[in-house]
Amino acid sequence: MPHVDMLFSQLQKRNIDSVYITGLIKRFTSSIQTIRDSIPSGEISGSVQQLPTKKRRALGHEEQQLLAREVCDTILSHAKERFSFTNTLVSSTLLQGDLFQQHSRTFPEAALETTVEAYPLLDKAKLKMELSLVYDNDQFRACSGAVTLL
């Protein structure tokens, strides 16, 4: 499915926010739902005979349709489950070293708000002050992530 590959490549962008991620997920689930809805819903006539597990058998057309619907249902449920809480992804943009110079000019208020919503134990004022100090210090701009900051 090309939809999965496109979603993956779009989520790899470095400068993302929760609104962007939510839009991507909505488009992805909408595309998968459209595929699911395009599959004719035919009931399997008669009972499916269980063959010995050693022999492979070809699936009939109705069985393939049923299986395709199940695959789409599984993809939709996993997408909703895995991307139900995307605010933590935005928090990572606060610690990307290549964005520090940009953040020192314009503080990322939206990312800070999203981070505080995702982690309510954080003190917003203290975090903003500490991040401002990091962004203004030239030594930290060479860092490539949270681990190198430590």
Image (cartoon, rainbow, N blue to C red):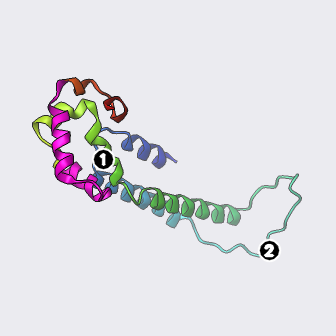
* Figure quadrant of residue 139: top left
Q: Earlier in the sequence, mark 2 or mark 1?
A: 2
Q: Which quadrant: the C terminus?
A: top left
Give me the residue at 37% from left, 59% from top.
26
* Figure quadrant of residue 84: bottom left
Of the residues shown, which amino acid type is indicated by label 2?
Ser
**The residue tagged with tag 2: helix, strand or loop?**
loop
Q: Is residue 15 visible?
A: no
Question: From the viewer's perspective, is residue 110 above or below residue 76?
Answer: above
Magenta region, main secondary structure: helix
Give me the residue at 86% from left, 56% from top.
53
Q: Is residue 25 left or right of residue 77?
A: left
Report the front residue among 13 and 65: 13
Disc 1 target residue: 91
Of the residues shown, which amino acid type is indicated by label 1?
Ser
Q: Is residue 48 magenta?
A: no
Q: Nearer the viewer, mark 2 or mark 1?
A: 1
Disc 2 target residue: 47
Report the front residue among 104 and 17: 104
Q: Which residues are magenta?
A: 110-138
Report the front residue among 65 and 132: 132
Q: Say which mark, if any, is on residue 34.
A: none
**The residue tagged with tag 1: helix, strand or loop?**
helix
Dot 2, crowdedness within 10 Å: few (<14), some or many (≥20)?
A: few
Give me the residue at 16% from left, 51% from top.
125
